[in-house]
Image (spheres, rainbow, N blue to C red):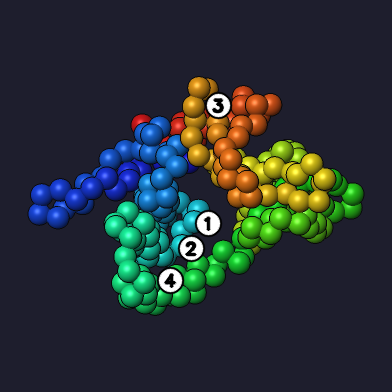
Amino acid sequence: MDLKAAQVFVSYGAGGIPVYANFNTDKILSDAIKQKIQNLKGIIEFCKVNSLGFKCEEIDESILDGLLQLQDIRNDISHHAAPTREQAEAELKQVIPLFQEMLTRTRLLGNCKLLRFENFGTKCRCESFNGHSLNREFDEYSFSDLQRNYVLGLGQEQLFVLWDSECFSLSPFLHFEKDATGHESYLCLYKKKKNGKYWYEPVKKRTERTFDHLQIRFDTEKDEILRLLMP
């Protein structure tokens, strides 16, 4: 699928007219939440306009507008001078209705299972990542032949999503780490590429780290994404 004509919102120009631009490396590999949401919105809108039949076309773009609004509110609260308790309560009261609405509208994520392949017998045994739960949980899945071949090809070092009948990898944007005891696994969010390495922030320790043995694979995955989206 050729997505090179897809564009992403940049800013508002004269007269409040939105300005769009092609994807580039900085936009695709940004760790800014707002940029990530704009990236998703740009891709979803392009897929819908061109009726590509992607799974993401089921997502209402207004959900992303709501997330952008929440992010703006979050930035406003975190960057201005510390309010009084009364001011903070007043600000939060204004946010609560939008927050509750977005919790309801993002329930579709309940259909998305975040998994890692562990082993194969008669079924694929996969580790399940449920929210930020750290205790390791496993389930067995009866994939179709096509799904099973794809999951086996990913191996044990990639996270993937099972969304209804679709499977797709989340690497290099999301990875995982096991603790020394083997009892916990936690998600690691891509933060940046620095000095030729991909840096991730674990949800538990919050200390950025790399996975040196996977750098070549991460680069290959990144290049595939750039070829898909960049003119």
Measured Cα–Cα span from mark 4 to mark 1: 25 Å
**Split into 4 quadrants, where in the image is the C terminus?**
top left
Disc 1 marks which residue? 55
Locate residue 211 relative to residue 178 in the image: left or right. left
Numbered mark located on residue 1 in the image = none
Circle 2: element type: helix
**Mark in front: 4 vs 1:** 4
Disc 3 marks which residue? 197
Disc 4 marks which residue? 99
Give the amino acid at mark 4: Phe
Locate residue 163 relative to residue 150 in the image: left or right. left
**Mark in front: 4 vs 2:** 4
Q: Position of residue 71 (x, y in %)?
A: 37, 58
Q: Is residue 130 above or below residue 126?
A: below
Q: Are marks 2 and 1 in contact (CB under 8 Å)?
A: yes
Residue at the image point whose x is 60% and y is 67% from the top: 110
Residue at the image point whose x is 46% and y is 62% from the top: 59
Q: Are marks 3 and 2 in contact (CB under 8 Å)?
A: no
Examine the image and state in which quarter residue 112 appears.
bottom right
